[in-house]
Image: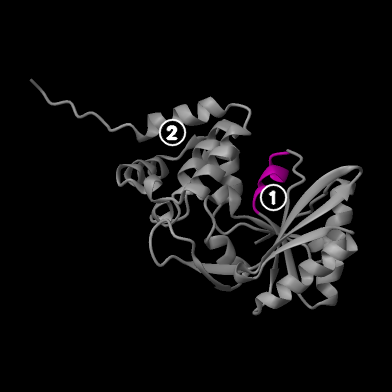
């Protein structure tokens, strides 16, 4: 963790400060995480705010989300089994979405299945994520002069080097949707997929892991690809990466 000064746009800052005040009253540590942090460090405005609170009880995370939704005059969708919630709120005439979760760790009983989850620390929460560039958090419950970037997997360095790097060797086996996400992020940001990560993707495709996904999960990821600016380029890269390698032998 390193001390850095972060200056969020005032409109976003007001919402994050509100969330931090509510978390403080409830005795919770709170972080903004994932894609919001990635895009913020890239200088890209991202209104899809992901918040994580640390608690040993999922109920406290849900309680926090309900209080925040009420303060924003928003609506809330709760997923108690995963300790998560989605807040829908109005900002300047636009419908916004905010994901709120309790920090958690995951365990996959079998490949491509949904994981079992349990409360955990913010570091454990970041460990379960897909790529290093999505495994960063900014601490919101410290004074501004002591704002912390939590970056245990060198995601900021990977942003600088413009590369997609997976966090562990079984990542695409545990969750094959990450194969599609890797392609989507690579095309969106014009990043390269790091060599070992690409090798793991090819191995997972050859094992037929994408076929193990339930249709609903695969459909969701395809819809996300179709929302990208260059969807056909994403599919093209997927086909190219999954194509069997040809071995050439001397005559």
Sequence-earlier tag: 1 or 2: 1
Magenta stretch bounds:
34-43
Q: Nearer the viewer, residue 70 or 154?
A: 70
Seen as rendered, the residue at the extreme front is: 215
Number of residues whose C-alpha sits closer than 10 Å to that of mark 2, classed few (under 14), some (14–19) or many (20 or more):
some
Picture coordinates of residue 71, whole percent (x, y): 89, 63
Q: Nearer the viewer, residue 148 or 92?
A: 92
Picture coordinates of residue 188, whole percent (x, y): 60, 33
Residue 50 tag number: none
The residue that mark 1 highlights is 37
Q: How many marks?
A: 2
Give the quadrant of residue 3: bottom right
Instruction: Check the image and report above or below for 48 versus 141.
Output: above
Residue 238 tag number: 2
Disc 1 on helix, strand or loop?
helix
Disc 2 on helix, strand or loop?
helix
Q: Residue at x 38, y 46 (%)?
A: 211
Q: Nearer the viewer, residue 168 or 86?
A: 86
Queried whether the magenta region covers residue 42, the answer comes back as: yes
What quarter of the picture does the N terminus occupy? bottom right
What quarter of the picture does the C terminus occupy? top left
């Amino acid at each position: 963790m390193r001390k850095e000064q972060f200056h969020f746009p005032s409109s976003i800052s007001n919402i994050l400060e509100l969330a931090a005040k509510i978390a403080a009253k409830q005795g919770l540590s709170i972080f903004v995480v994932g894609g919001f942090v990635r895009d913020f460090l890239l200088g890209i405005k991202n209104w899809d705010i992901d918040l994580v609170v640390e608690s040993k009880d999922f109920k406290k995370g849900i309680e926090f989300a309900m209080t925040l939704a009420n303060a924003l005059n928003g609506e809330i969708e709760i997923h108690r089994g995963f300790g998560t919630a989605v807040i829908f709120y109005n900002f300047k005439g636009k419908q916004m979405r905010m994901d709120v979760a309790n920090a958690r760790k995951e365990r996959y009983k079998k490949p491509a299945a949904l994981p079992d989850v349990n409360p955990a620390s913010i570091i454990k929460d970041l460990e379960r994520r897909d790529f290093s560039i999505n495994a960063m958090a900014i601490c919101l419950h410290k004074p501004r002069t002591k704002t912390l970037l939590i970056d245990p997997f060198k995601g900021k360095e990977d942003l600088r080097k413009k590369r997609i790097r997976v966090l562990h060797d079984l990542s695409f086996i545990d969750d094959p949707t990450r194969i599609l996400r890797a392609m989507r992020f690579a095309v969106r940001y014009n990043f390269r997929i790091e060599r070992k990560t690409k090798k793991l993707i090819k191995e997972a495709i050859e094992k037929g892991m994408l076929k193990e996904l339930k249709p609903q999960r695969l459909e969701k990821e395809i819809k996300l690809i179709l929302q990208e600016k260059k969807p056909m380029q994403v599919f093209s890269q997927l086909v190219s990466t999954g194509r069997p390698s040809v071995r050439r032998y001397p005559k």
